[in-house]
Amino acid sequence: MAAKMKHSPDHEDESYDVVQHQDPGQNCLTPVIQLPADAALAVVSALTGMVREAHRQERTDPTPPGALKRAQEFEEGDVFMIEPPFEGFVSGRYLMDFYDVRDRNICSRMHIHTGSRFVRMMTGPDTTIRVSSLAPVDVHPSPTWSGGPLEAFTDLLPDVPAPHVRQRHNVIVPPNSWVDMQVPCGVSHQFNAVGPNAVVDSVHPEESLETLREGMSGYKMMAQTIFLAKERNAALTCLETRGASVSAGIAN
């Protein structure tokens, strides 16, 4: 069995030293399609509506202690565990209703997960998602993408202890878009939505296995996460959508 990553299995705010952390690989991002604004809004609204209804029901009828809580909260948004793992099928699936970083004046932190992740990020009108990593994001070509090159740039990760610096690699998901991303275990990433219409459909391919390996008491997104910062930064540190470097080329 692989070595454990968590110091304390159920700790929901555990962090690593960002200066020492080195990504073991790269995130791979593929832009899939762009939709008309009304179609994109309909899809995003339907999926975020499911999350919001699940959280409304959780407030009205809370999950009993010890039972699997499917309506959860994460740094980037409210979450609904749409497909829990079961015996013989180790994957879990989550929907996340993104927070608009401007509403709370908070950016989510750079983090890693105890297992690999597959995420489909979907945006509606007037909304972008800034995808960031400490390693360059590998942007794959797509035969169905008509939106042109994705905006990509680098900046410095905030609040890295002096005299150290860590470069942050950013790719912008434009409005009315679907973008798929493979997140290998232990590879840093950070998602921040600017705008009201954004959702993630996230698959955790080995959720039962990673939970068992780490010795966690249950399926909890926050416990399956290790942060690379102790505190969250103000929204200003993740609002920028352009930089000095060139855009990420996409072969249509």
Image: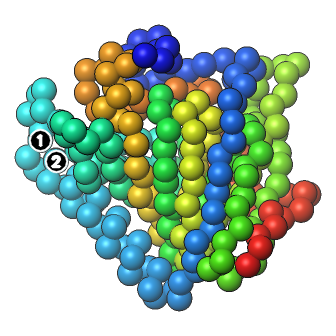
Q: Is residue 206 left or right of residue 139?
A: left
Q: How far across and how far down the image is residue 130, in percent?
A: 65, 56
Which numbered tag is attached to residue 62? Answer: 1
23 over 148 or under it: above or below: above
Q: Is residue 252 left or right of residue 201?
A: right
Residue at figure coordinates x 40%, y 49% from the top left:
203
Q: Residues within 10 Å of mark 1 (few under 14, many from 20)?
A: few
Which numbered tag is attached to residue 58? Answer: 2
Q: Nearer the viewer, residue 187 or 168?
A: 187
Residue at figure coordinates x 21%, y 55% from the top left:
54
Is any atom of residue 99 visible in this view? no
Q: How far across and how far down the image is residue 75, in percent?
A: 47, 41
Which numbered tag is attached to residue 50? Answer: none
Q: Is residue 68 left or right of residue 168?
A: left
Residues at circles 2 and 1 in contact by the CB criterion of under 8 Å: yes
Quarter assignment of residue 141: bottom right
116 over 53 or under it: above or below: above
Quarter assignment of residue 19: top right
What SS does tag 1 mark?
loop
Assign the C terminus to one quadrant of the image. bottom right
53 over 106 or under it: above or below: below
Q: How far across and how far down the image is residue 139, in percent?
A: 72, 58
**Distance from Cα at disc 2 to Cα at disc 1:** 5 Å
